[in-house]
Image (tube, helix red, strand yellow):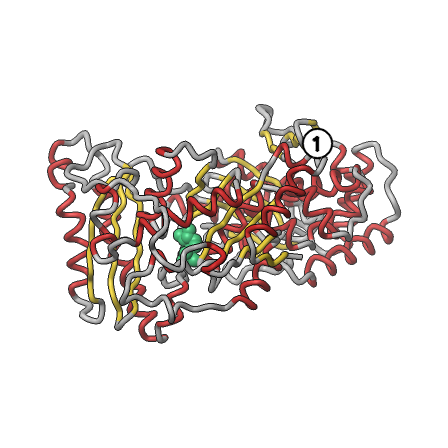
């Protein structure tokens, strides 16, 4: 249950108890702080998710900080939605919501000690129109760091100037906290999620999506001139041209009232005067639609390479996914990834600790601290090696009692969230064939090729029996196996969270009566037609 605390004393008390608990986990992981102003949305959730994977305790602060609002800004009007925020935090696995009053934070007036970031970082971008804003942010964030003393603090790239200022603050004041910058989460239109989007009408939201599109236009130009070794390309890729591309795009949209477009070095925020191969740049925009001020940015770097294609192979147990996945990956020179092995590993870890597998809280803690590594073998025909906290569990996770329990574990939202994030991280560069139950629908909905591999329950029971016999295990009768398979299908396809369903754009392959070679050849053909020779 997410605990709501409103005083510094209560929060310190809670954290002191937490820190002095003999719980071994604390030493390995730590306390996360996610500072917010509330009115939580999917962007905030992405910070919470990441914080939960990397820490054992997540503190989320909700504080609409008066110090960072100018006189004519929307401090009074800023959305305050504590009840629904608490519900969101509860569902997302936040441990403590710290929501103090301005009086408790000692910031009801400006005559307090304040933290002033270097002037060169707060003279451009948003600081031009929001005088005192970053001083207010730096002051409140320093106070929160002192109150919570987190191991890590999570901020969005969306507020790129804020993130750079906070990184510098931590460096300059030697604050013992790791700053984690998280990617901007967007609506399907490209509009970045923001609490201030609540001020926009449906039509305004459509207009606002052009802000990101203008950034993408500029990004395309940046990548076109990727080959900086050619002098002509270098001459064409100038900061002025990149800025002009976005500005020209927005010039055709008079409803968008542009405040600035600036191209700066992402860490120092200094104006970019020349594009170099090592440049880590941020193209940032602020604009108004009606009275609503929106900001967005895009990072431009030659180190960010476009991701390679992904093949998602989903389907029920026993349809032949593992073998097919491995062989497709070998044929195409891609990495194969069996996500089922990750759920099996958490199941094994929970069984070893003898916890009730339906105790979601305990299982979540086990999932969060389990380190799973998937190591491909040099010999293509051998199964990928699975390490659980450094121990080889490749065979043990295939034992019948793990198989019998894996659906119970895989149905738990917290476990899925933790593993899906890890799968997305493993696959973020692409070049993988990933098999599972929700790869094409949930983990990589943008996969280039999606296959839904299935077979009748009787066919799958026969294959399972043959597998068990080949592994030297006792094989149950076919009708027992078939019933088990049907029960597992039922659980997988009816669970509330990420059920096993065929993605709308997946190709259905029923493997009844087909050889492995035929299935593999069909998928390779599809890949070649779609990706290699589109
Ligand atoms: P706010 O509540 O607006 O102060 O935001 C709290 C944190 O959430 C900040 O670190 C923001 O950068 C981050 N954030 C806000 N919107 C998004 C988004 N769309 N994607 C990722 N992070 C975000």
In the image, residue 270 sits, relative to residue 87, either above or below, namely above
Question: Can residue 498 be seen in the rendering of this structure?
Answer: no
In the image, residue 204 sits, relative to residue 396, either above or below, namely below
Q: Foreground residue, 94 or 379?
A: 94
Percent of width and height locating residue 218:
22, 50
In the image, residue 174 sits, relative to residue 517, either above or below, namely above
Percent of width and height locating residue 395:
74, 32
Relative side of 55 to 271, left or right:
right
What residue do we see at 33% from left, 42% from top? 164
Q: Foreground residue, 215 or 155?
A: 155
What residue do we see at 16% from left, 37% from top? 274
Quadrant field for ligand 1? bottom left
Q: Tag 1's secondary structure?
A: loop
Percent of width and height locating residue 299:
31, 45
Percent of width and height locating residue 500:
64, 58
Question: Can residue 225 be seen in the rendering of this structure?
Answer: yes
Which residue is farthest front?
111
What residue do we see at 41% from left, 64% from top? 195
Q: Which residue is mark 1?
A: 394
* Image quadrant assignment for residue 165: top left
What residue do we see at 61% from left, 60% from top? 501
């Amino acid at each position: 249950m997410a605990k709501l605390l409103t005083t510094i004393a209560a929060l310190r008390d809670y954290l002191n108890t937490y820190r002095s608990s003999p719980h071994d986990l604390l030493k390995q992981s730590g306390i996360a702080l996610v500072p917010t102003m509330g009115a939580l949305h999917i962007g905030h959730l992405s910070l919470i998710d990441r914080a939960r994977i990397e820490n054992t305790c997540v503190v989320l602060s909700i504080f609409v900080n008066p110090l960072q609002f100018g006189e004519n800004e929307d401090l009074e009007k800023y959305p305050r939605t504590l009840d629904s925020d608490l519900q969101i935090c509860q569902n997302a696995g936040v441990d403590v919501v710290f929501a103090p009053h301005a009086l408790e934070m000692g910031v009801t007036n400006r005559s307090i000690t304040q933290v002033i970031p270097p002037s060169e970082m707060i003279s451009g971008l948003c600081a031009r129109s929001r005088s005192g804003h970053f001083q207010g942010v730096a002051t409140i964030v320093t106070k929160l760091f002192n109150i919570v003393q987190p191991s890590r603090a999570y901020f969005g790239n969306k507020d790129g100037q804020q993130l750079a200022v906070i990184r510098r603050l931590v460096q300059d004041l030697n604050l013992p906290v790791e700053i984690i910058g998280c990617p901007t989460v967007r609506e399907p239109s490209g509009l970045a999620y923001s609490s201030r989007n609540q001020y926009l009408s449906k039509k305004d939201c459509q207009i606002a999506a052009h802000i990101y599109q203008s950034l993408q236009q500029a990004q395309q130009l940046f990548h076109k001139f990727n080959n900086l070794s050619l002098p002509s390309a270098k001459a064409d890729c100038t900061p002025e041209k990149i800025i002009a591309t976005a500005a020209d795009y927005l010039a055709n949209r008079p409803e968008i009232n542009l405040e600035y477009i600036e191209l700066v070095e992402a860490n120092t925020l200094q104006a970019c005067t020349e594009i170099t191969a090592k440049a880590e740049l941020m193209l940032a925009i602020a604009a108004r639609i009606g009275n609503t001020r929106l900001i967005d940015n895009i990072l431009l770097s030659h180190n960010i390479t476009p991701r390679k294609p992904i093949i998602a192979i989903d389907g029920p147990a026993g349809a032949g996914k593992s073998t097919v996945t491995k062989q497709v990956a070998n044929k195409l020179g891609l990495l194969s990834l069996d996500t089922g092995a990750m759920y099996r590993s958490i199941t094994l870890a929970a069984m070893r600790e003898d916890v009730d597998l339906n105790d979601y809280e305990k299982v979540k803690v086990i999932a969060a601290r389990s380190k799973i590594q998937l190591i491909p073998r040099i010999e293509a025909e051998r199964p990928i090696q699975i390490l659980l906290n450094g121990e080889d569990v490749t065979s043990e996770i295939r034992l019948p009692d793990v198989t019998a329990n894996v659906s119970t574990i895989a149905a738990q939202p917290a476990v899925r969230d933790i593993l899906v994030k890890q799968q997305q991280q493993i696959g973020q560069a692409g070049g993988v064939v990933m098999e599972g139950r929700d790869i094409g629908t949930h983990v990589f909905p943008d996969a280039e090729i999606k296959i839904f591999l299935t077979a009748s329950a009787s066919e799958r029971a026969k294959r399972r029996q043959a597998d068990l016999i080949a592994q030297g295990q006792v094989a149950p009768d076919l009708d027992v196996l078939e019933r088990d398979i049907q029960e597992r299908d039922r659980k997988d396809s009816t669970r509330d969270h990420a059920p096993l369903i065929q993605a709308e754009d997946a190709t259905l392959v029923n493997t009844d009566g087909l050889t492995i070679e035929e299935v593999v050849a069909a998928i390779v053909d599809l890949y070649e037609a779609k990706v290699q020779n589109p």
